[in-house]
Amino acid sequence: MNYHILRGMNIDQPVFFKMLADATRLRALLLLQTEGELCVCELTHALQLSQPKISRHLAQLRETGLVRARRDGLWMHYRINPALPGWGLNILQEAASGLQSNTAAHQDRERLCVMPNRPGAACCA
């Protein structure tokens, strides 16, 4: 599923919104928007989903250009692609702001905040 939506940062809008239409991808994007950069282990803990499922969704987001990945040893860290066009960045910011009181989004942030051994010193196993 290689969409190649980034061509000089001309984003295919239907693909952009398709990525947001999936609940898991949306929840991950909202966390990335509010937190900046997160390790896969942080996303699995916050979203309470398996590592393979999170990694599959992150791969789709990376393929479409919505997120960027950075390897740190064994760990992969993800963040919103800062090269997204302004309209895309604005949509993600508005979604994160508008959904702050959303129960699921709030619970995801709460779980992330209380994650034991949260990366910083060393990432989880």
Image (cartoon, rainbow, N blue to C red):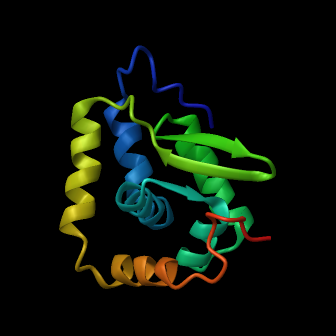
Residue 66 on image: x %, y %: 45, 40
Q: Quadrant of the N terminus?
A: top right
Q: Is residue 5 left or right of residue 59?
A: left
Name the one closer to the observer, 42 or 72.
72
Residue 102 on image: x %, y %: 27, 79
Residue 58 on image: x %, y %: 59, 51
Q: Is residue 89 left or right of residue 47?
A: left
Residue lying at 37% horizontally and 29% vertically, measured from the top left: 12
Name the one closer to the observer, 8 or 116.
116
Q: Is residue 114 left or right of residue 8?
A: right
Residue lying at 79% horizontally and 47% vertically, measured from the top left: 73
Q: Is residue 9 above or below residue 108?
A: above
Residue 91 on image: x %, y %: 23, 47
Name the one closer to the observer, 14 or 50.
50
Q: Quadrant of the C terminus?
A: bottom right
Residue lying at 71% horizontally and 65% vertically, measured from the top left: 123
How many numbered markers are drawn?
A: 0
Q: Residue furthest top?
A: 8
Residue lying at 36% horizontally and 32% vertically, measured from the top left: 84
